[in-house]
Amino acid sequence: MHEVLKKHICKFTLISDEDFNAMKHYFKIIKVNKKENLLLEGNICKQHFFVSKGCLRKFFINDKGVEQTTEFAIENWWITDNIAFEHGLATSFYIQAVENSEILVLDRNAQEKLLEQFPKMERYFRFIYQRAYAASQMRIKYLYDFTKEEFYEHLCKNHPEFVQRIPQYLIASFLGFSPEYLSEIRKKKRS
Amino acid sequence: MHEVLKKHICKFTLISDEDFNAMKHYFKIIKVNKKENLLLEGNICKQHFFVSKGCLRKFFINDKGVEQTTEFAIENWWITDNIAFEHGLATSFYIQAVENSEILVLDRNAQEKLLEQFPKMERYFRFIYQRAYAASQMRIKYLYDFTKEEFYEHLCKNHPEFVQRIPQYLIASFLGFSPEYLSEIRKKKRS
């Protein structure tokens, strides 16, 4: 399972086998079942999750009691509530497995020690955050610019791997509309 | 002007005077007047901007021809279209001065060379992107969770420095409603 992470790190920075073996112990490997929670609203957020196999999602529960999904993470993605993780605060999010998944868990303290011991990993995480930030900036543009229907079209065109893999009711939760409404749009699209 | 940047870097990583003097030449200092554009839609985005004094904003022009502001940057903030900057692509955004401003400009190639020559700066930029990403994740939550009125309330409470400093028509553009509507909300708030 560590091999998936090693490959991913090597895309951004050169790391020797010796160094990688030495940093392995900072990561805890866990297996989670579909619908199992990794983080609950109100928990202190102490962990950063790397998906080596499977899919996670992040959501919050809104005033109406509806789950609003804000993010998915598939293989090679990191996911956490970053503001709560950096400052060791209680989170307002949930993180849950969409599929049976294999996850590498990096504790907050472990991430700090890892970066101290292996400064090369600063470059890796710089890229991780840089790309995640860039993607979320575009996401914000789309939230202003697109109707919900256009956002769905965009998702189908640019991220078919998500639309095919993730259950429709979760795609609806990500887009911010009801599963019934998504079903209507899909029918319209096919006709 | 470089001193503002040096102070900011030193919040995240130790850097000697000698090193800082050696890296200065990667940055170009410019002064821009209020309403002057630093980036135009369709331009290849090659520059990363650090605000040492003043305020910039990023916006796009929507289908209706309306300017939609997605981001402000005041002192100690970096701003660019990150996805276009990393990949050297044409941008769909504008970056414009909200006030007369003093800016440190880091070209794409210069940023790469700076990081190669001073790997310590990986840590600095890791923090810059990490915090910017964390803030934009919360922003996405608010875009789903808040009504426009609630978003305005949140802004007044949590970022009074923006609301007091930035012209109301730009606050309206950031919130995604008309200046007239913002004016109505403010009246209601006062009464």
Image: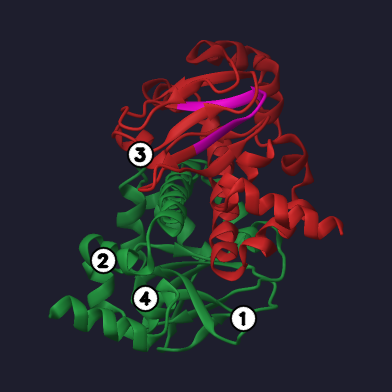
Chain colours: A red, B green
CA separation in Å, label 2 and label 4: 22 Å
Q: Answer left or right for B50 relative to A126.
A: left
Of badges 2 and 4, the one in the foreground is 2
Task: Find disc 4 in the rendering and name its residue.
Answer: B55
Badge 2 sits on which subunit? B
CA separation in Å, label 1 and label 4: 17 Å
Task: Find disc 1 in the rendering and name its residue.
Answer: B40
Between B71 and A168, which is closer to the camera in this rendering?
A168
- Considering the image in quadrants, where does the N terminus of chain A appear? top right
Displayed quadrant of residue A86: top left
Q: Which mark is residue B152?
A: none
**Badge 1 or badge 2: first in the primary sequence:** 1
Magenta residues span A48-58
Q: Amino acid at mark 3?
A: Ser
Badge 3 sits on which subunit? A
Circle 4 Cα neighbour tier, 10 Å, few/some/many (<14 / 14–19 / ≥20): many
Badge 4 sits on which subunit? B
Q: Are marks 3 and 4 in contact (CB under 8 Å)?
A: no
Q: Position of residue A21 (x, y in %)?
A: 60, 11
Between A154 and A188, which is closer to the camera in this rendering?
A188
